[in-house]
Amino acid sequence: MNRCAVLLAAGNGTRMKSAGPKVLGEVLFKPMICWVVDNCREAGIEDLCAVVGQGAEAVCAVLPQGCQTVYQAQRKGTGHAVLCAKDYLERHRGQDVLIACGDAPFVAPEVIARALEAHRREQAAATVITALLEDPSGYGRIVRSKEGALEAIVEEKDASPAIRQIREVNSGAYWFQADALLESLEQLRCANSQGEYYLTDTVAILRREGRKVQACLAGDQYTVMGANDRRGLQRLNEIARRRVLDRLLDEGVDIPFEDGVIVGPEVQVGRDTRLLPGTVLRGRTTVGEGCVIGPRAQVEESQIGDRCQVRDTYLLSSVLEEGVEIGPYCRVRPGSRIGKGVKIGNFVEVKNSQLGEGTKVAHLTYVGDSDVGSRVNFGCGTVTVNYDGFHKHRTTIGDDVFVGCNANLVAPVTIGDGSYIAAGSTVTVDTPADALLIARSRETIKEGRAAQMRKKAGC
Ligand code: UD1
Ligand code: CA
């Protein structure tokens, strides 16, 4: 492939006023550095090296396997950061290397690929990805000659008033010939307002040496947008959110009101599904066709089949087969598989359990670590007692079982097909098929006793 990338992710994030590293700031629940990694991979770059510094361990934890890392002990600027990856660059001599900032998530794969094409076509030593902004403040400005050739990149803090007027800015992403980059890095100095080694100075250095450098202008202004502070991060979130909602609307998803509807970039939603206010869909969630999700549903890393309804509910790492109705006020925790047509009503928690087709858990029930058959009816207030204080155990319930209200099923326990558990029973033994199990003491009625007690008490 002859291409690789160095991702700059060591920065202090001082302007974020965060204890953590800036590149872990999330855009639609996904750390910025992960956007950058995915953009690179989609552009066909598999060989990656990240420069890490502040919060290195936390940053490394979100990087994909196989991504190399180098440590920048002191943050002396973007040029110094790339120099920290010198050994990596040496190993990639003869290749084209993309340098990208871990705090600029919108440099799209198509833009990266198009810039590489131009870079190779022109045999450039460096190709800078740029964009035109209404308000260029905060970004490095692209200085061109009268003829339009790229001359230099000037940081805002070092720019004259005339240069500050320039609206073409540096995205912070560039293609370099690895050899040319290595040579120009050696010549960087830190004689600027911030006392840093600027990677951007390599452009003027290469040009002075008579090497070809060029700018590749991206079509939309969002390409370059980065986040240096919380406001910037919020802006990126707003842009990304708008883009996802527009995509879903184009794909036939019904979003009558957008209030609080937030959908992650990897989520897929089928047509004619309605997303109602307060719905948050995260991770690699998929939602089928004709569903109603919300109001107020939070779904993470889950698969929802066609024609499901999920209201006022939290659903994590679980699967709903088609036609499931959940809510309001339910929590479905990881590892659950809810069968076709199941109904789960208010104040029900399901954890790491399978529920067979047509089963109903209508109210106030806990189903944990359980394998439940089809057409089972749970009475109000049923608890699967899955924890004995030391270990978790499973409950197995066959098909067509009726569990009466307020039953405790003490695991490990098995209830056979077609059995009937009387209300208020605490079940500690296995029940065969088609049996009636009653586990409670008989009532005693003492006639007139209440009246006697009242008299004795003087009431
Ligand atoms: C940089 C560019 C600017 C461009 C902008 C685009 C330089 C000198 N300036 O400015 O022209 O318009 O990006 O967003 O390159 N980093 C390190 N080690 C360091 C310093 C920074 O790894 O010592 C990393 C940061 O984590 C960040 C990236 O490099 O991901 C960019 O650094 P930052 O300080 O944000 O640069 P900008 O001022 O935004
Ligand atoms: Ca930045």
Image (cartoon, rainbow, N blue to C red):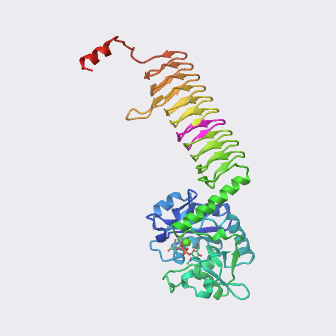
**Quadrant in which the N terminus is drawn:** bottom right
Relative depth, front residue between 168 and 87: 168
Relative depth, front residue between 225 and 181: 225
Residue at 73% x, 71% y is 117
* Residue 203 among magenta residues: no
Measuring from the top left, give residue 322's x and y in whole percent: 66, 36
Q: Quadrant of ligand 1?
A: bottom right
* Residue 326 among magenta residues: yes
Measuring from the top left, give residue 422's x and y in whole percent: 48, 19
Q: Which residue is farthest right?
A: 121
Q: Which residues are magenta?
A: 315-336
Relative depth, front residue between 45 and 258: 258
Q: Which residue is farthest front?
A: 459
In the visual, does 291 lie left or right of 160?
right
- Residue 313 figure quarter: top right
**Quadrant in which the C terminus is drawn:** top left
Measuring from the top left, give residue 6's x and y in whole percent: 58, 69
